[in-house]
Image (spheres, rainbow, N blue to C red):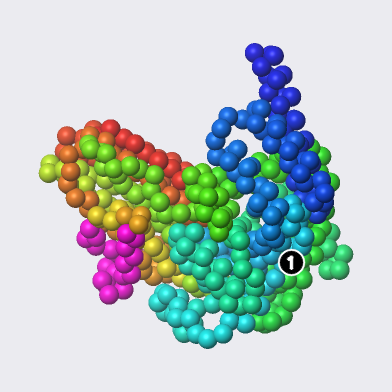
Amino acid sequence: MLFAFFLFSVFFFKIAAAGKNLIFSVLENQPEKFEKNYSLFKKNIDLFLPDGDIKTLISFLPETLGKSEEKTYYIILQNNRELRPSGGFMGSFAKLKFINGGLLNMEIQDIYVPDGQLPGHVQPPWPIQQAFKQGWWKLRDANWDPDFPTAAQTIAWFLEKGGEERADGIIAVNLSLFEKILPLIGPVKLIDYNQVVNEENFYQVIQGYSETNFFPGSTQKKDILSAFAEVFFEKAKALNPVEKLRALRIILKSIERKQTLFYFQNQKLQQTFHQRAWDGSLTSKWLIKDGEINDYLYMVETNLGANKANCCIDREIVHGVFRTNSGLIEEELKIKFNNKSTVSTPQPPVFWGGNYINFLRVYLPAEAVIKEISAGGEKVAPENVFYDYREKEKLLGVGFFVTISFSSEKTVQINYFLPAKPANRYNLNLKRQPGIESFKYQLNIAGENVKSKTIIKTILSDQDFSIKL
């Protein structure tokens, strides 16, 4: 056992050292070192890891990092205090260009710059029109689709139409990731701003400089983020090996929990990310089998209140599943929202909180039949419900507006049923939206000739349940 642990440690640190050399030769734009560092890293990986998705991903590195031709990627910086389907409102982006295995350039830009260059008129989804009454669809609202590969293609289209280069990939990152890494990095001193940024004041400082006296076309958001990124990455390079591994774990956890999402034009690479469930797709994992009921539940919130109310929103789901004598599966979904904000409309220097205007979409199996939808005890009229049938994923989405005023609670209830079928097992694929850290979930299973069962969990990432009936 001791010898096995020793071997593991040796291999682990060999891989870590080779990986560190590879990463920094790329980030410091040293293409002459790429081939050597990549070969050494791959050699250690081949010795230590069995065949699998990770080794496949590593094999794509030369092409992904521009070994054969220049590649351009966009990292979309999202503010998850203003929830959108892919995590948060897209306020800025970083454009990264790679050539010959080196990072040629990184440029941070305000989302409103390409927005202002978009020619013509694009009709928005009706909930955006209903909320903003503006009559057009812009890049800043392009992450509308809950299926990230679809949303990413829309984002890429808007970027290109706004005068940016064609995207080889789109990566969505929530700003909360930087808050989690800052304790390792330590305080970031922004000399030109006479400001020190840490995990406690990160959001206040960045949002304050971004929003105070903001107007479309101003560079203040780009300037503060660029200044922060420059110091942040310099301090990251100076971390010791243990701290770098901790930072890597934080990033990997963000990826595993879908707080960071990926889309690539290279379909073979994209398929590998899809197999790892790193692409934020709507796809259900269950295969259709005789004797099994496959259920699906994905709650997608979109903050259309033009505020940062999601700092202060808690949510809890109570999900009842009842099997009748005929085999029909009757379901009752209760979603309780609690808005802890103490003000209706925040005023600077406070930039978060307020009334929560939420366009809520709930995705269910395509065969689900909706009986009734209510919010705060009042029935939602059928003409106010948006239906989104996804033929490819075999899913049905129902969407409607729910407003949760500050310092109040509201419960949404959806009653529906799944058709009867002979079954002795119930499977549920429960998904958690990017941008939401966690929510409480209670599953109650009951019915005729079914042993009652209750499961209570805090949902931190997508969760699968498989229960014998």
Name the main secondary structure of what is drawn in magenta. Answer: strand
**Mark 1 nearby-residue class (10 Å; few <14, some 14–19, many ≥20):** few
Quarter where residue 81 is shown: bottom right
Q: In the rendered image, which quarter contains the N terminus?
A: top right
Nearest the camera: 240 or 155?
Answer: 155
Q: Work out whether residue 216 can be spotted.
A: yes
* 131 lies left or right of 208: left
Percent of width and height locating residue 186: 79, 49
Residue 135 versus residue 271: which sits nearer the camera? 271
Image quarter in which the C terminus is found: top left
**Which of the two residues, 293 or 309, is positioned nearer the viewer here?**
293
Check the image and report above or below for 139 versus 333: below
| Residue shown at the point (27%, 72%) measured from the top left | 381
Residue type for callout 1: Glu
Q: Residue at horizontal 73%, vertical 71%?
A: 222
Residue 317, how many percent across, how many down?
A: 39, 51
Task: Tell me if residue 376 is in the magenta stretch.
Answer: yes
Q: Is residue 129 above or below residue 171?
A: below
Q: Position of residue 191 (x, y in %)?
A: 87, 64
- Residue shown at 58% from the left, 77% from the top: 161
Is residue 258 visible to us here?
Answer: no
Secondary element under disc 1, as helix, strand or loop, is strand
For this view, does 303 lie left or right of residue 234? left
Q: Residue at x 29, y 42 (%)?
A: 288
Give, as a single range, the part of the protein colored magenta.
369-391
Identify the image quadrant of residue 321.
top left
Q: For mark 1, what is the residue?
A: 107
Side of 428 where 26 appears, left or right: right
Is 248 drawn above or below residue 221 in the view shown?
Answer: above
Q: Is residue 279 magenta?
A: no
In this picture, is 101 found above or below 153?
above
